[in-house]
Every structure is written in structure tokens, then in C-alpha cells.
């Protein structure tokens, strides 16, 4: 369809972007790669009067090594995330997941920050951010603040980023010593996840010393499977123990029903996929 | 990828020439209808009902009219009598025919029905204006489920009809009840052939423009049927047919969805005439999902009566076919195109066919790649697998025991069709060899024994279909109101170039290349000197257009005859020029020479020039050189083939993966094997998509739940394996070129192959059917239900 008309501002710095948003009021929207926002506009689900394009803000296009963490700019594309040397070396889970997002055309335009801020419950990148306890650097008229992943994802398509704020970058801890895997379940190659599971485990001498598991599309936001994590931690890194722990993967979740799967099937998938994700993360 | 030998030299027929038209089609630098920009164009946008069924109480257009750039807003009151589409196939004497308004007057009958039309001087303004039109509706109950719709007291789609039953068509062949009484086993199944949304790459688009000071209006449309459309537009609008020129410029796919007359075409024509300016409308993808006709949508109750030793005695077919809210061009006839094909390739003594057409408050259905034959093929190929399973027979053995053997052709089957030729044994043998049938059966056994969570199934489809529509008398007997002939004129221009005017209307099939190849062999000019003219009632006045795998099967015959007539006339001129008796003139590769005196010769190009100057023609001969033919085919054509699918099914998640697909088709003589290959690949993708991905879903209020491609899944190349294809060649004996059709075969054959494979994988778990599409959830539920002891 055809969007209603809007003004377009191309920002070259974060400050410029924030200023443009502030000037436009509630009605403005940040434009990243446009892969989610443009469909929203074309379907006339939203009609902002101004779009502030941040896709070429230099600061937001960088991946920086901070020692124990990587700072990934919000305007880095999904394709760049997939291939960036720092990402593949230190946060391989993010690179592996990026490769499963949509199709090559969309990966070349869509941004990591846009994925997170769009906060689609079936998005893959938010789940990775959540499982790694990432930190989100957000800039607004009052300066910059850092929001932990647990507080960033608020509801369906809703994050802690205010209407006059820009997500600048996401800080992800390096994962030396961890095994990880994202298990995505979808129907066609370029489709969204029906359910996805991100798992990261640290195995020490046959025992799972630490475990992190997060679920995609099992509720309004990516959620940590706390009871699975608890059941795994301190237990043996065996297929049987993992399968047993995965049985509680759907506990406390509230998945929706849609044309691809109803809630009951999603709960079933969460259990099967958690078993598979953790098994692969543990290198079994 | 393919075993077919691709010749690129020698005679043109049979050569895998690159398609002439592809450079312009693939780059888009061509005449797509939406690329046509005429000065002063007005843009049309349609306001569509958000409700499935409602009374229109009031429409307030004032805010829309006040928007700058908006010129007019029309509602049903402005065109109270105008129909937006029509049905040319009243299949029974007592069928209940609907009136399809161009704009709804007082009631909407499906979500997507048109309630108002905006004309603006800019496309975006027209879209903005839609948001400003205020409609008050009074909700009426939706009619969604066909079985519910037929119950007494059900809410009615068309209140004046007093029922939702559109028609009941019966065709009893043989005495089914008698053979059933003799049967050892009667296998009964209910199959659901789900509703599909065609989704060609190019959405619909139309431009209508008054031509200067004349009375002519030219209408460009992304249509498959410019000729038929012209007649119907004249009938619906009252504009004289001779004042309407319809052009189908380059058209980007149709699959039956553009074998139609649509209200946007009618409205664009009427408004262009009324306003005296070009009017343009291009469908958005969201509109396509609701506003372009859908396909399939049948509930099939099938019985197969068999003996213990595996002989099929008879078949009973009882269909409910969803018409949607209104009848369009061949809505009621579409399920009946399959009527003759339920027995497939098998011999049987009786076939009892009944089809009930049902109105619902949904988008109208109509022809979609295969139109009736995919549904028939699905039913027969699924039920033979089920019968084999119930009898404990190997499914291919069961088929062998019942199919028509190659010695038995021509064979008149139970529904009365005479299959001219075929060789099911040869196609099957080749498919089994390419597939590695025995090895895959061994792997299946191993996986079953080890309890592998991923099970393997082998799906078989040994299909035939009827295509090449159609002998006109047969169509008349079926109450179809048009003929099935095709026309070709071949003109030699003074410079020796050739214009081949065809009545077929390609929309991706490569006619320009294939038709040139046929003509090149017959008249002996190089392929590149032949221009194929099509899809324009001004330049190609006669034609019945492209659908039903008819273009080569019927149109090809006209090319052959027209070419031969041209060659014959040229022979007389050549004989005159060479001072020889016409009987002594030989014609090879474009050269006429005197038998025994090859020095005395002339070329067809030289003859063309002589025919143009007319300085030295035989006495009494008319100048110019052309050949013309309008062919009514003797019979349908019957392509066939054996398709095999290896399906992996993850029993934990229900995920189905197509691992290997072998398609051995027999479409008779191949004009261009590369084009055949393309048709097979595309057809397979579409048939596989029905089995695995696609399906239009409605909620109980009649809202389409699959209104975007996020919900209505189409596979891409990444989802499909490399197909293994080959052909056996059993030429048709009723078609002079020996050709059959290949446009729909892949889509017809592959759907049951996939589902048979999925069911075969899961049969040890007690599964006997899986709803299409075989989505993870549908497969997982089938496993759960089987394990709980229920059906499906
Ligand atoms: C067909 C298709 C399939 C897809 N499949 C998947 C998939 O499988 N998995 C998946 O995870 N995603 C998928 N996506 C989504 C894709 O990854 C998008 O690119 C992504 O969700 C949004 O990124 P973007 O840069 O395009 O954001 P945009 O579309 O530009 O913006 C999205 C939203 O985020 C806001 N926004 C963007 N950047 C910022 C910022 N820096 N600060 C503040 N707000 C911002 C915008 O205002 C808007 O509300 C798919 C998309 C399509 C079209």
C-alpha cells in the first residue's frame, strides 16, 4: 500500500537526531534500515509526520572492543553483525543468530538497533541481547543513559526507548569459555521465528557451571527460562540431564496463537527446541 | 540437475533456445501495465469493506472530496446497474447466478468488496482519500463454513436465493452402487483441498484511455485474456465492442488469477469514457490478497471400492466447492474441469461424481493453475495410497495393477474421455531409476527400526491431466458460452521479416521464442527474423488467449497450418518465377528449388518481395504473402508423468523437509526443452507450496487471517531442493505437432506426491492423513491425534 506523507530528516550525529526528534514532538519516528518501519507505514498502521534517519550516523555504525565487552552500534546492519571479525570472535552467538534473520536483502538493510527497538516478539536479535544480559545505550534530550536488557524490552513492540530518544549502541559481554547456540524454528527460509531459543552454557569438567536460556515468541518480550537455567546449573552436561531440564522450558510463558502455531504447540516447541539448543551449546 | 539433452543446433523444434523475451522481462524495462504513463492520467483507488457481510447504511464522502487533488468519489448509487464481473459458465440449468456489482449498492458480501471509488490526480492522494470516507455498516452474519452454509436456517449470502446452494452437478458413470456391492474393501476419506491465493509476481493493473477524437478507448490490463475481456467489457458496459481495444502488454504471471474480468477493469473503462481522460489503477499486494480471485477450496468425500487382490472397481466423489460470494468468469465450472479426471490413469468400472457449489461470504474462487484437475489428481492419488495401505500392498504395485498399460491406448476411460497415447510404465521406470527408490525404501526401514525422530516417507504421484482447452463442441455441451479454438496469421513482410500474429496471450511462458521456433522450421527463416505479435485486439484481432495449458497444444496447431499455407502460396510464386511446375518445386530450409536442378532456386525472402511488388505473379494470384489458420482442436491432450518425493518428517516438531524430488513428465514433443523445464520447475514449486506452505485462513467472522505474506507463506528457492527432472516422449496423436501441455502438470502432480510422502513417513504411527498445508502444527497434531487413537 501507500504510506501517508511524512517529512524526512537525515541525521549525521546522535545529537542531531535527538534534536530533530525533540523538535518534531511525539509524532516523529527514528528510521534505521526501514525493514520493519516501512511495512508499518505502508500498511498505515502508523503515520508519523517526520522520519529521522540514523542509518548513516558514524558513531552508530561502529563495533568497538571495550576489553571485556563489545559495543555494537545500533546502525550496524544485520549482515555486518554476521560477518564482523570482533563479533564472530567474541560473541559468536550474535553472528550465528544474525545469519538466521530474514533473507540477504533484508539483512543488508536492517540494523541491529532497529531489530532491538522494533521489539517484535518473534524477532531473534532481542532474545540474544536478553540471554547475554546486554546493556542498551540510549541518548535523549537529557543526555545518555544505560538500560539493562531485563528492563529494555517492555511489551509487544515496546521498549524503554522514549519517543525523543535514540538507541545508540548495545554492549554485549565477550563469551570466552562459553558454548552457545540459537535454535530457530520457522517455516520458510526468510520467515520470522515461530519459537526460538538462545542458549549459552559454560561447561567445566563435565558439569554445567553456568547456563543462560532465553526464548523468542513465548510472550510479549524475550524471556529467560529461569527454571531451565536453574535445573541445568551444577548438573552434568549430558543429553539426559539437558532433556530433563528442558521439560520446564514453557513454564511461566504466555505465548500467543497465530496462523503458524497456537499456544499449546508453541509450548511444546519451546521444550523440544530448548533441549536442542542447550545440547548444541554444550557441544554434545 | 536435469538429464534432458539440451540441443542448441539443428532444426529449431526441439532446440533449447534462450528466451528472446527474457532480457526485457527480467530487467523490467518493458511495458508492464503500471509502467504506462499517459499525460493527464487520473488515478483510481478503491475503498474495500472491512467486514465480510454487512448492510451499507450510509456513506459519507464529503471529507474525501474536500481533500486537495481528489476529483470524484463514486459509490454504488452512481452505477446502480453496472456489473463488475460476470460468469460465462452456468454449469446446470437451475444454477443460481449472482449479480456482482461494480460497486456495492446496499450490501457487502466479503471482506474486500468495493464500497467506493476515488478518482484523484495523484496515486498517493487517492490512497489518502480512502481513509477519509466514512461508512456506516450494519453487521450481518458471515457465512464461512460450507457445511454450515447448507444447513436449513443458515444465514444467507444472497437472501433472494433462499439458499446458499449455488448448484448441484452430477455425473454418474457406470453403476457405482453395483460395483461397490462386489467390493471387498471400500476405502473412505475426506480430503480438504484448501483455499489458495494465486500471487503472481506482478499484481493486477489497468489503464483505460480514450484515444484522441475517435470513439476508441484502449484498455491496457495485466490480463491473460485480452480477447475474451474485450467481449465481456462490451457486454457489461454497453460500449460497442468495436470501440474497445484491449491490450495485454507484458504480463508478469497469472496462474489463472488474470483469467478473469474484474470490477477495476470495468470501472476504469467506464470512468475513462465518462471523464474523457486516462484512468489508472494498480493493485497493492494487500489488495491482491482479498480482491483477486482465489483458487481450490473443496471438501472432498472420496470412496474407492476395491477387491482383496487390489483391483479398483469404482470410485465415488462427493464435493463441496466454495464459490465465495459471487460467481466470476468460470467460478462454478472450475471444480467441474476436474470432473472427468477423478479416475486418473486407472481403469475402473464406475465413477459416481457429484459436486455442490456453495456460496460463502469470502473472496470469489475461480481458476488457479490446474483448475479442478489438481483437486481431482489429489483425490485419486491420495486414495490409491490409502487403498494400498488398507490392503497391505506396496503403493506402486497397487498402481501398476490398475493403470492403463501402454498397449491399451487409445483408451476410453470411465468418464468417457479417450486418452490418445501414454506410457505410464516408461515414465515410472525412469522415475524409479532417478530416485533410487529401493535405496530410499531401505533407509526408511532402517529409520523405522531405529526409532529415528526423523522419519522418511516416499510419496508417489502417477498422474495424468486433460489440457489444451478445448474442442468447441465439447465446451458447448458443457454449457460454456465460448469456443476453444485458436488463431494464427503469419505475414511475410517485403524485407523478408516475418510477423507471426497469435491469439494466445503469454504472461511468462515464452511464446515469443517457442512460436518463432515452430515457424522457423516450417517457413525456413531464422528465429531472430520472426516477430511474435500477441495480446492486442488491435494487432491480433482473433484469439482465445492463454490458460488451461492450451497455447501450444491448440495455438501451436494454428501456427503449423498458417505456416504451411504461407509456404504453399510461396511455392506457386516460386514455381512461376523459376518457370517450373509447382509439383517439381522442393522446399528446404527457406529455399525453393527445382527437383533435379538445384541451381534453379529462390528463397522465401525473395518470394516475399515478389509478392509485395506483385510485378510478376501467376495469373489471378492475389498479391502479398501470408498464411492464416483458425484451429479447433480434435480433442484435449493428456500429458502424464510419474513424480516421486522423499520427505523427511521430524516427529518431535512436525517439521517436514522435502529432501529429493524426481519428476518424469511426458508432454509429447518438446518445442523448447528449456522452456518445458521452466514450466515444470515453476509448477512443482506451486504444487509443493500447496502441500507444504500455502493456505488462506478465515476467522468465524469471515476476516482473512492470511492477508499478508507474513501469514500467507510462499516458498522461495531457498526452501526447495534441486529438482531432478526428465521426460519421456510419447507424442500425442490428436495434435499435429505431437505436443501436449506442460503449463500445469507440475502443479497438478506434486501436491499429492508430497502429502503421500508425509503420510508414508508417519503411517507406522497410525497417521492416515495430514491437513494441507503440512505445516509443523498440522503434522504434529496428526501425530498426536493418531497416538491418542483418533483419526488425523
Ligand atoms: C520479510 C521480513 C522478514 C523478517 N524476518 C526476520 C527474522 O526472521 N528475524 C528477525 O529478527 N527480524 C526479521 N525481520 C525484521 C528485520 O530484521 C528488520 O530489519 C528489523 O526488525 C528492524 O530493523 P530496521 O533497521 O530495518 O528498523 P526500522 O524498520 O528502520 O525501524 C524499526 C523500529 O525501530 C525504531 N528504530 C530503529 N532504529 C532505531 C534507533 N537506533 N533508535 C531508536 N529507534 C529505532 C524505528 O523507529 C521503528 O519503530 C524481518 C523483516 C522482514 C521485512
Image: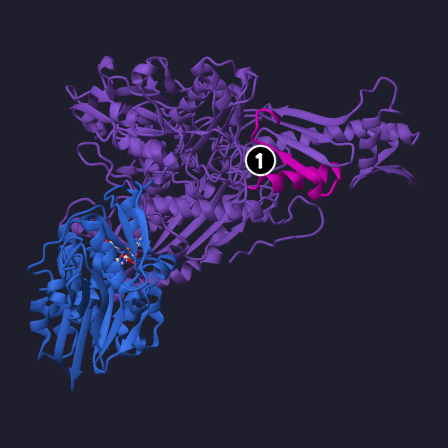
Chain colours: A blue, B purple
Q: Where is residue A50 in the image (x, y as percent from the top left)?
A: 27, 49
Q: Is residue B529 magenta?
A: yes
Residue B629 or residue B236, whichever sits in front:
B236
Q: What element carries label 1?
A: helix
Mark 1 crowdedness (10 Å alpha carbons): few <14, some 14-19, many ≥20: many
Q: Which residue is drawn at 61% across and 39% down?
A: B512
Q: Look at the image and give the residue range highlighted in magenta.
A: B510-539
Residue A207 or residue B533, whichever sits in front:
B533
Q: Name the residue under label 1.
A: B552
- Residue B562 in view here: yes
- Label count reads 1
Q: Is residue A118 magenta?
A: no
Q: Label 1 lies in what chain? A: B
Q: Where is residue B505 in the image (x, y as percent from the top left)?
A: 54, 32
Residue B190 or residue B555, whichever sits in front:
B555
Q: Quadrant of ligand 1?
A: bottom left
Amino acid at each position: 500500500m501507500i504510506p501517508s506523507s511524512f517529512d524526512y530528516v537525515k541525521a549525521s550525529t546522535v545529537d542531531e537526531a535527538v534534536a530533530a526528534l525533540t523538535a518534531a514532538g511525539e509524532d516523529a519516528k527514528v528510521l534505521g534500515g526501514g525493514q520493519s518501519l516501512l511495512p508499518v507505514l505502508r500498511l498505515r498502521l502508523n503515520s508519523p509526520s517526520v522520519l529521522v534517519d540514523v542509518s548513516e550516523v558514524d558513531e552508530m555504525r561502529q563495533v568497538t572492543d571495550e576489553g571485556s565487552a563489545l559495543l555494537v552500534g545500533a546502525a550496524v546492519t544485520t549482515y555486518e553483525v554476521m560477518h564482523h571479525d570482533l563479533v564472530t570472535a567474541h560473541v559468536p552467538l550474535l553472528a550465528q543468530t544474525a545469519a538466521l534473520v530474514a533473507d540477504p536483502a533484508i539483512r543488508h538493510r536492517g540494523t541491529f538497533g532497529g531489530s532491538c527497538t522494533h521489539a517484535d516478539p518473534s524477532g531473534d536479535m532481542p532474545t540474544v541481547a536478553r540471554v547475554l544480559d546486554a546493556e542498551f545505550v540510549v541518548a535523549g534530550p537529557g543526555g545518555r543513559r544505560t538500560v539493562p536488557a531485563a528492563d529494555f524490552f517492555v511489551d509487544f513492540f515496546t521498549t524503554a526507548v522514549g519517543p525523543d530518544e535514540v538507541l545508540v549502541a548495545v554492549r554485549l559481554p565477550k563469551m570466552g569459555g562459553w558454548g552457545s547456540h540459537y535454535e530457530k524454528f520457522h517455516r520458510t527460509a526468510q520467515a520470522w521465528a515461530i519459537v526460538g531459543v538462545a542458549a549459552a552454557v559454560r561447561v567445566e569438567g563435565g558439569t554445567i557451571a553456568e547456563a543462560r536460556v532465553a526464548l523468542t515468541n513465548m510472550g510479549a518480550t524475550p524471556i529467560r527460562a529461569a527454571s531451565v537455567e536453574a535445573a541445568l546449573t551444577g548438573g552434568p552436561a549430558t543429553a539426559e540431564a539437558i532433556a530433563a531440564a528442558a521439560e520446564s522450558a514453557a513454564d511461566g510463558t504466555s505465548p500467543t496463537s497465530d496462523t503458524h502455531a497456537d499456544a499449546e504447540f508453541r509450548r511444546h516447541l519451546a521444550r523440544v527446541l530448548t533441549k536442542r539448543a542447550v545440547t548444541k551449546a554444550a557441544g554434545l | 540437475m536435469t538429464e534432458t539433452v539440451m540441443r542448441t543446433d539443428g532444426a529449431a523444434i526441439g532446440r533449447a533456445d534462450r528466451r528472446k523475451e527474457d532480457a526485457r522481462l527480467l530487467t523490467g524495462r518493458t511495458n508492464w501495465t503500471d509502467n504506462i504513463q499517459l499525460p493527464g492520467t487520473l488515478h483510481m483507488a478503491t475503498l474495500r469493506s472491512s467486514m465480510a457481510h454487512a448492510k451499507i447504511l450510509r456513506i459519507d464522502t464529503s471529507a474525501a472530496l474536500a481533500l486537495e487533488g481528489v476529483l470524484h468519489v463514486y459509490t454504488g448509487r452512481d452505477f446502480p446497474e453496472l456489473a463488475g464481473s460476470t460468469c460465462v459458465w452456468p454449469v446446470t440449468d437451475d444454477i443460481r447466478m449472482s449479480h456482482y456489482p461494480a460497486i456495492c449498492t446496499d450490501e457487502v458480501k466479503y471482506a474486500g468488496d468495493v464500497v467506493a471509488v476515488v478518482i484523484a490526480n495523484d496515486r498517493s492522494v487517492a490512497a489518502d482519500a480512502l481513509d477519509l470516507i466514512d461508512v456506516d455498516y450494519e453487521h450481518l452474519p458471515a457465512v464461512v463454513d460450507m457445511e454450515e452454509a447448507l444447513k436449513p436456517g443458515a444465514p444467507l449470502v444472497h437472501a433472494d436465493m433462499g439458499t446458499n446452494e449455488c448448484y448441484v452437478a452430477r455425473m454418474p458413470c457406470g453403476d457405482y452402487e453395483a460395483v461397490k456391492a462386489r467390493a471387498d474393501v471400500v476405502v473412505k476419506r475426506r480430503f480438504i483441498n484448501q483455499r489458495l491465493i494465486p500471487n503472481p509476481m506482478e499484481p493486477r493493473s489497468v489503464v483505460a484511455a480514450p484515444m484522441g477524437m475517435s470513439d476508441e478507448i484502449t484498455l491496457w490490463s495485466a490480463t491473460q485474456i485480452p480477447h475474451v475481456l474485450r467481449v465481456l467489457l462490451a457486454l457489461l458496459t454497453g460500449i460497442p465492442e468495436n470501440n474497445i481495444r484491449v491490450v495485454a502488454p507484458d504480463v508478469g504471471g497469472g496462474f489463472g488469477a488474470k483469467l478473469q474480468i474484474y470490477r477495476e477493469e470495468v470501472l476504469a473503462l467506464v470512468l475513462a469514457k465518462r471523464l474523457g481522460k486516462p484512468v489508472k489503477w494498480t493493485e497493492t499486494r494487500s489488495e491482491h490478497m482479498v480482491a483477486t480471485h482465489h483458487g481450490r477450496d473443496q471438501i472432498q468425500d472420496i470412496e474407492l471400492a476395491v477387491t482383496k487382490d487390489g483391483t479398483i472397481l469404482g470410485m465415488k466423489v462427493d464435493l463441496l466447492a466454495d464459490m465465495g460470494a459471487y460467481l466470476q468468469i468460470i467460478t462454478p465450472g472450475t471444480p467441474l474441469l476436474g470432473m472427468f479426471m477423478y479416475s486418473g490413469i486407472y481403469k475402473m468400472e464406475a465413477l459416481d461424481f457429484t459436486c455442490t457449489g456453495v456460496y460463502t461470504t469470502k473472496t470469489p474462487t475461480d481458476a488457479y493453475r490446474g483448475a479442478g484437475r489438481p483437486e481431482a489428481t489429489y483425490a485419486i492419488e491420495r486414495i490409491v495410497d490409502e487403498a494400498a495401505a488398507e490392503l497391505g500392498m506396496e503403493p506402486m504395485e497397487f498402481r501398476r495393477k490398475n493403470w492403463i498399460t501402454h498397449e491399451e491406448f487409445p483408451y476410453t476411460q470411465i468418464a468417457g474421455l479417450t486418452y490418445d497415447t501414454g506410457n505410464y510404465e516408461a515414465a515410472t521406470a525412469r522415475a524409479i531409476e532417478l530416485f533410487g527408490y529401493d535405496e530410499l525404501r531401505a533407509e526408511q526401514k532402517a529409520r523405522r527400526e531405529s526409532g529415528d525422530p526423523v522419519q522418511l516417507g516416499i510419496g508417489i504421484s502417477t498422474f495424468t491431466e486433460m489440457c489444451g482447452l478445448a474442442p468447441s463442441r465439447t465446451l458447448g455441451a458443457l454449457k460454456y458460452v465460448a469456443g476453444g479454438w485458436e488463431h494464427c496469421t503469419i505475414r511475410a513482410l517485403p524485407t523478408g521479416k516475418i510477423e507471426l500474429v497469435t491469439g494466445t496471450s503469454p504472461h511468462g511462458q515464452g511464446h515469443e521464442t517457442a512460436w518463432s521456433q515452430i515457424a522457423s522450421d516450417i517457413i525456413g527463416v531464422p528465429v531472430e527474423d520472426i516477430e511474435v505479435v500477441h495480446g492486442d485486439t488491435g494487432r491480433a484481432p482473433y484469439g482465445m488467449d492463454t490458460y488451461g495449458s492450451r497455447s501450444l497444444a491448440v495455438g501451436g496447431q494454428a501456427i503449423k497450418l498458417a505456416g504451411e499455407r504461407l509456404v504453399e502460396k510461396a511455392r506457386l510464386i516460386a514455381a512461376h518465377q523459376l518457370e517450373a511446375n509447382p509439383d517439381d518445386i522442393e522446399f528446404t530450409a527457406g529455399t525453393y528449388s527445382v527437383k533435379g536442378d538445384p541451381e534453379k532456386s529462390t528463397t522465401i525472402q525473395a518470394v516475399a518481395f515478389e509478392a509485395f511488388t506483385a510485378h510478376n505473379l501467376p495469373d489471378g494470384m492475389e498479391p502479398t504473402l501470408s498464411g492464416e489458420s483458425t484451429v479447433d482442436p480434435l480433442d484435449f491432450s493428456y500429458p502424464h508423468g510419474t513424480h516421486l518425493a522423499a520427505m523427511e518428517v521430524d516427529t518431535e516438531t512436525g517439521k517436514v523437509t522435502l529432501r529429493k524430488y524426481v519428476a518424469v513428465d511426458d508432454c509429447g514433443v518438446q518445442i523448447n526443452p528449456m522452456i518445458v523445464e521452466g514450466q515444470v520447475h515453476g509448477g512443482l514449486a506451486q504444487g509443493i507450496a500447496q502441500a507444504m506452505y500455502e493456505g488462506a485462513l478465515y476467522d468465524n467472522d469471515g476476516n482473512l487471517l492470511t492477508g499478508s505474506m507474513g501469514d500467507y507463506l510462499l516458498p522461495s528457492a531457498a526452501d526447495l531442493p534441486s529438482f531432478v527432472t526428465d521426460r519421456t516422449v510419447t507424442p500425442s496423436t490428436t495434435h499435429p505437432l505431437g505436443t501436449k501441455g506442460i503449463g500445469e502438470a507440475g502443479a497438478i502432480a506434486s501436491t499429492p506426491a508430497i502429502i503421500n510422502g508425509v503420510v508414508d513417513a508417519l503411517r507406522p504411527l497410525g497417521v492416515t492423513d495430514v491437513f494441507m498445508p503440512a505445516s509443523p502444527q498440522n503434522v504434529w497434531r496428526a501425530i498426536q491425534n493418531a497416538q491418542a487413537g483418533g483419526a488425523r
